[in-house]
Structure formats: structure tokens, C-alpha cells
Image: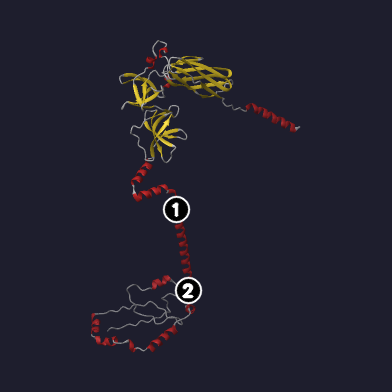
């Protein structure tokens, strides 16, 4: 019975927790696709926008942009707009597909695109859709320009504001006005300026005052913004890169102010079909440095990572560049040595550490051996009763002569030399005069002794006597020493001093 109650209680707890479990749902993927029609100048053309999703759709909305110099919006299903912008909105009618037909009139020859600036939608359950946006390419061929009329009866040429002809990189362009507000780059505002005496519509950066013209290619009919340099009167491609929601950079041409270390090699970087000067890092080919204008109107260098597709401000490593310059200025053998050290610094550090460790081990082993030798010598001196300190103290002072010799030693032992006592003798000049009376003849007798007067037997006898007195065994010599350690100045030592009376 108790087991049944426990089981029912556990089941009740599980039932209570089930409603609390949240279900994670993912947004369904939807697509917004367009047709790519062809037409002629002056004729009307229909562009179909189609939403598709794997689930039932409830609400849909999208904002489209187009080139108002090439197309003029006429009408559309659930669509409103003009002057370069069209907004479509509606509902899917609880279906998985929804179509919208847009009608435009072709104004000029060429190929132009209709693009999606933003889109949103929800499914039947109210969950937002993840929409993939497409674009439409409209091809416009030769036709009848007389069919082109504006609502107020003005011609399309006046509306588009076609202006002077300019040349950019060998291609002829026409300065065009009447562009849509949706085409204005972030951070720029629409305005007017004078070019060769003609008033032209331009966009100007609010922070830095940089100006861009809207140009249309004479051969292809494609239109885009181009930066204008008022100092030299030249145009360059315009490409804006968004870094974040309110930050961006506009790539610039080199105006001669770019200075980079020698590790960066000048090259070109192509973005959206436009070429810009760049400098590639030869040590790491994945990184480029570009010259750009930021959202604050300041010009500077930015590092571009081709792997992640990101940009960040380039800060030059002054220490590394100065070291590189100093290394490059040093030529010959010294320069090669510096290059070798910089290239193999880690290996050199390892070798130096190993050499230092070996020297340290050698020093430790040598110190231990010397210590053991000193201990062995101390044990040997203690064993034979040798006192080095007393022997050093008993040595006569430098420059003094011994005036007495020890004639006897301890009884039964060999003769031991003892320090002599110096006698104080007073000498006058008269004492030295007595020595002058000696004549050289008295000493000549001694000096005329020849070695031949000495008999070899005498030498042999002397050598035998001396040899007999020598002690052959070291142990016998050591056994004769007293057990008590004795110094050189003990009472039982006797010595005799002979004094010479010079009077």
C-alpha cells in the first residue's frame, strides 16, 4: 500500500512539472525572390516578388530600392512608393506562398537592379520568419524615349538631372541627379554643388564634408556614387563598409600620406568589382591594410582580415618598426648576425640556458671535490699531529738571520730545529778597524785549496756515515714522535748559543 502511495505521489509531481517545461521553437526559413525581366526604353515592365515558406504565413512586409534614373514606379499589388523606394506589405492568407506584381517604366538603356533593403514576416503562430532576400535584374534595351512622361508632363531628362560628362579610370560617365533617398549612403545627406558651372545633386558626409556624385556609365548604363576630390578635381570609386550599427568606413585612394613598414607590399584589393589600393603583410598574407574615411570624417589606416572579413584600426608597432629600420641599416656581417638572432631567438635562448646549466653543474661538482679534498687533508694532519698554524707562527721574520743552531733534540729522537734566539751585540767603529789588519795572504791559503787534495775515500766514507744515520722506514720516524702534541717552544727543549766576543 505504501509503495502504491509513493508511486502516485511521484506521478503527481511529474504532472505538475510538465506544464512548466518550455518548448524552444526555431524561426522558419522563408525566401523573397524576384523575376529578372527584359524591356525597352519607354515601355513598361512587370517584376514579380514572391514569398515562399515551409509553414503557413500570416504577415509580410518588404522595402525595395531601385535606380530612379533607369526605372519609374507605376503601380503594384499592395505596393506604394516612388522616387527610388517601393514598400510592399500584406498577408499570406494562411498559405505558404505570396506573390506581388510591380510595374515599372524603363527610362534609360542598361541593366539595373531592384534590391531589398529590409524584410520581415510572421507565420500563423506569430513566430518571426527568417527571410532570405534576393534581387531583380532588369535589362533595358533601345526603345522609344518619347513614351517616357512624368506625372507632371516633364521629360525624364529634366527629372534625372543629367549633367556634365566625366571620365573615371578610362570610362565615360554622366553626372546624374534625381537619385532615390534610399540610395544615399549612411552618414551622408543630399545636397547640391556647382561642377563646371552646372548645379548638380550630390551627397555630402555630415562629419567630414566629403562629397560624392552619382554617376551613370555611358556604355553599360550602370549608376553608382563616386567620391570627388575637390583639390585635384578627380573621381574615385565609392565603397562603404559597415563596421557596426553606427560605424562605417569609406575606402579611399592613396593620396601620398600612407607610410608603412617595409614588411607591407603594395597591391590592390577588389570589393564588389571595385579596385582599391592596399598593402599586404608579407609575413602574414591574410591581412591587408587599407586607407579609409571613418564615420567621424577622419582618414586613417585600417587592417582587413580576409579570413573573418573584419576591419579594425591599424596601429603601427613603433618598437618593431624602429628595430627593423636599425636592422636594415646595419649591413655586412653585423647585419646578418642581427637577422640570425631575430630569426632564431628562441633556439639561441634554449642553447644559452643549456650552456648555463652545464657550467653550473661543473662548478658544483668542482666545489664538492675541493671540499672533500680539504676534509681529507685535515684528517691526515690530525692523524700525524701536524699543526700548520703553529708552524706558520714559528717561521722567522723575513730579512732576519739565524744566530744560533739547535744542537740537540728530545732524547731518543731525531734532531728538531728550534727557532734561534738572537743576541744583542753592540759594535763600534774600532771593532771593525781590527778586521782591516788582516791581509789577503791569510785568506789565500784557504782559497788555493784544490779539489784534487781531497781523497775520494774520504767522500765515500762520509757518504756511508750519512746513509747509516738516515731512517729508512717512515713508520719508525712517526713512532719516535711523542704522543703529546708539542710546539716548538717547550721547556724540555735545550739549545746552546755561542757568543763571539769581538773585543
Residue 332 drawn above or below residue 188: below
Question: Residue furthest toward the top?
Answer: 153
Q: Position of residue 86 (x, y in %)?
A: 47, 17
Q: Residue at x 37, y 49 (%)?
A: 336
- Badge 1 density bin: few <14, some 14–19, many ≥20, Cα 10 Å: few
- Indicate the position of residue 18 as horizontal and vertical percent values: 65, 28
- Name the residue rendered at 35%, 45% in the picture: 328
Give whichever of 329, 186 is nearer the camera: 329
Q: Nearer the viewer, residue 236 or 80?
A: 236
Residue 159 at what x, y percent from top left? Answer: 39, 15
Residue corresponding to mark 1: 351
Q: Which residue is mark 2?
A: 384
Identify which residue is drawn at 36% across, 18% down.
162
Residue 187, quarter of picture: top left
Disc 2 on helix, strand or loop? Answer: helix
10 Å crowding of disc 2: few (<14), some (14-19), many (20+): few
Instruction: Identify which residue, 502 or 58, lies in the foreground.
Output: 58
List x then y, in percent, for residue 435. Answer: 25, 83
- Mark 1 and mark 2: Cα distance apart in space: 50 Å
Residue 212: in sight, yes or no? Answer: no
Instruction: Answer above or below: position of 403 versus 92.
Output: below
- Whether tag 1 and tag 2 are in contact, CB under 8 A, the answer is no
Amino acid at each position: 500500500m505504501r509503495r502504491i502511495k509513493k508511486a502516485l505521489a511521484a506521478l503527481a509531481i511529474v504532472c505538475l512539472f510538465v506544464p512548466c517545461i518550455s518548448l524552444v521553437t526555431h524561426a522558419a526559413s522563408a525566401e523573397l525572390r524576384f523575376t529578372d525581366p527584359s524591356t525597352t526604353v519607354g515601355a513598361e515592365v512587370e517584376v514579380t516578388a514572391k514569398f515562399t515558406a515551409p509553414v503557413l504565413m500570416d504577415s509580410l512586409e518588404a522595402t525595395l530600392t531601385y535606380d530612379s534614373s533607369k526605372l519609374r514606379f507605376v503601380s503594384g499589388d499592395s505596393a506604394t512608393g516612388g522616387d527610388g523606394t517601393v514598400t510592399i506589405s500584406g498577408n499570406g492568407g494562411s498559405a505558404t506562398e505570396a506573390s506581388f506584381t510591380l510595374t515599372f517604366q524603363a527610362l534609360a538603356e542598361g541593366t539595373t537592379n531592384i534590391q531589398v533593403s529590409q524584410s520581415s514576416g510572421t507565420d500563423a503562430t506569430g513566430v518571426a520568419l527568417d527571410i532570405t532576400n534576393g534581387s531583380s535584374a532588369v535589362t533595358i534595351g533601345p526603345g522609344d524615349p518619347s513614351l517616357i512622361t512624368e506625372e507632371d508632363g516633364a521629360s525624364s531628362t529634366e527629372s534625372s538631372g543629367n549633367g556634365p560628362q566625366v571620365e573615371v579610370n578610362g570610362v565615360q560617365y554622366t553626372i546624374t541627379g534625381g537619385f532615390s533617398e534610399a540610395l544615399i549612403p549612411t552618414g551622408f545627406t543630399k545636397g547640391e554643388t556647382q561642377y563646371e558651372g552646372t548645379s548638380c545633386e550630390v551627397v555630402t558626409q555630415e562629419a567630414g564634408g566629403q562629397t560624392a556624385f552619382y554617376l551613370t556609365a555611358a556604355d553599360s548604363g550602370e549608376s553608382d556614387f563616386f567620391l570627388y576630390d575637390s583639390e585635384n578635381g578627380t573621381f574615385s570609386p565609392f565603397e562603404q563598409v559597415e563596421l557596426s550599427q553606427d560605424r562605417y568606413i569609406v575606402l579611399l585612394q592613396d593620396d601620398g600620406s600612407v607610410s608603412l613598414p617595409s614588411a607591407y607590399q603594395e597591391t590592390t584589393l577588389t570589393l564588389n568589382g571595385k579596385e582599391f589600393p592596399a598593402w599586404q603583410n608579407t609575413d602574414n598574407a591574410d591581412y591587408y591594410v587599407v586607407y579609409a574615411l571613418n564615420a567621424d570624417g577622419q582618414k586613417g589606416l585600417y587592417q582587413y582580415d580576409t579570413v573573418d572579413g573584419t576591419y579594425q584600426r591599424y596601429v603601427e608597432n613603433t618598437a618593431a618598426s624602429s628595430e627593423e629600420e636599425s636592422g636594415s641599416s646595419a649591413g655586412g656581417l653585423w647585419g646578418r648576425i642581427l637577422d640570425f638572432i631575430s630569426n632564431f631567438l628562441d633556439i639561441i635562448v634554449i642553447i644559452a640556458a643549456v650552456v648555463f646549466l652545464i657550467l653550473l653543474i661543473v662548478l658544483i661538482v668542482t666545489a664538492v671535490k675541493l671540499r672533500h679534498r680539504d676534509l681529507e687533508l685535515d684528517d691526515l694532519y690530525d692523524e700525524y699531529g701536524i699543526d700548520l698554524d703553529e708552524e706558520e707562527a714559528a717561521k722567522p721574520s723575513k730579512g732576519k738571520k739565524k744566530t744560533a743552531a739547535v744542537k740537540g733534540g728530545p732524547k731518543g729522537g731525531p734532531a728538531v730545529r728550534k727557532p734561534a734566539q738572537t743576541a744583542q751585540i753592540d759594535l763600534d767603529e774600532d771593532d771593525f778597524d781590527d778586521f782591516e789588519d788582516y791581509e789577503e795572504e791569510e785568506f789565500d791559503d784557504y782559497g788555493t785549496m784544490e779539489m784534487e787534495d781531497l781523497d775520494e775515500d774520504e767522500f765515500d766514507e762520509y757518504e756511508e756515515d750519512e746513509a747509516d744515520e738516515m731512517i729508512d722506514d717512515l713508520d719508525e720516524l712517526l713512532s719516535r714522535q711523542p704522543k703529546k702534541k708539542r710546539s716548538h717552544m717547550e721547556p724540555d727543549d735545550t739549545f746552546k748559543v755561542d757568543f763571539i766576543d769581538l773585543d
